[in-house]
Amino acid sequence: MVSSEKPPSYLVRVMECKQGAVRAVRFNVDGEYCLTCGSDKSVKLWNPHKGTLLHVYAGHGYEVLDARGSSDNSLICSCGMDKSVMVWNVSTGKSMLKLRGHAARVNCLAFNEESTVILSGSMDGTVRVWDLRSRRNDPIQILDEAKDSVMTVQVSTPLILTGSLDCYTRIYDLRNGQLISNCIGEGVTCASFSGDGQCVLTSTMNSSLKLMDKDTGELLSQYSGHVSKDYKVESCFTPSDTHVLSGSEDGYVYCWDLVQSTLANRLQHKGSSVVHSLSPHPSQPFLLTASLGQVWLWSSHSPEEECS
């Protein structure tokens, strides 16, 4: 694996997605491809390393807010403002399932590690769990502890991490029937597990980025400088957990040293105001960012280093 000790610093390319505003960008499981979600109701599949469009998936009734690829790259799930979750066959481009049940827009999605289950978080305050093997149109479980919109959901078997505007992150251990709730003090817009599974990184609506101990909820570090007040701005770890990254409403992505909490770098998105969606490559030192109708690919290595 290429060392990812250095944070992303070099712009590789900018892709004009031509699907209205890009609401989210996501690497697939091996980082060879990516998905973009558009305000024009479409999901697009790309090879970001070449800048080529591979397929367009159309069928949502309103804006698409999130999408994920399955672990074997055969399926895509997407969700949006039409309150539905759609499952697509990657190769044929056809819709296989349209799952309804949420009472409001669906903000976020996650597959389990086997891609047999989809979890969807909604503005209705619930996370619904859908079983793809049974192809049932009703959820097999509903997690309804949140008192406000669920903005983020992540699975790290056997744990499910959610973040809500009710100011809480919640970690569900379905195997042992346990729930750990942690009050962050501000509406949570993004939450993610560290690569080693020991920490949780949380973004809030008050320009706050916090690193918490997964088990105790203890505050380990805070990172500042970015702006996140009016939009859902995402954050993430680099693949090696050496740095944390956040979008911002000032046209930059901020990168901090995880341990020292010092600002290591800022990635400028010229012509952009809000950089809201981030997706780190699962193993290599690449980062995808989304702003307006564009997706930006960044690398930790300069073009000269890539060629050497």
Image (cartoon, grey):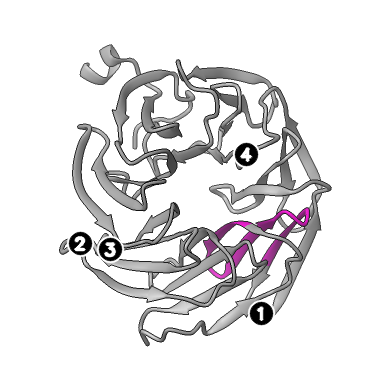
Check if residue 193 falls in the magenta segment. Answer: no
Q: Amino acid at mark 1?
A: Asn
Q: Earlier in the sequence, mark 3 or mark 1?
A: 3
Image position of 297 with respect to 267: above or below: below
Graded by Cα atoms within 10 Å as few (under 14), some (14 to 19) or many (20 or more), the crowding at tag 2 reads some
Expressed as whole percent of the image width and height from the top left, the position of residue 71 reads 33, 62
C-alpha separation, residue under disc 4 versus residue under disc 2: 31 Å
The segment highlighted magenta reads: 151-171
Q: What is the three-letter code of the residue carrying label 2?
A: Gly
Tell me the distance, in whole angstroms, between the alpha carbons under discs 3 and 1: 28 Å
Q: Amino acid at mark 3?
A: Asp
Residue that mark 3 sits on: 72
Quadrant assignment for the C terminus: top left
Between the C-alphas of marks 2 and 1, the distance is 38 Å
Which residue bears the numbered disc 1? 176
In the picture of the structure, the residue carrying the numbered disc 2 is: 93
Residue drawn at 59 percent across, 51 percent down: 193
- As for residue 155 lying within the magenta part, the answer is yes
Which amino acid, mark 4? Tyr
* As drawn, 181 above or below 39: below
| x and y percentages locating residue 66 in the rendered image | 45, 53
Q: Secondary structure at mark 3?
A: loop
- Compared across the picture, whether 157 is left or right of 52 comes to right
Relative side of 98 to 268, left or right: left
**Marks 3 and 2 close (CB-CB < 8 Å):** no
Return the disc, 3 or 2, that comes first in the chain's sequence.
Answer: 3
**Left or right relative to 142: residue 79:** left
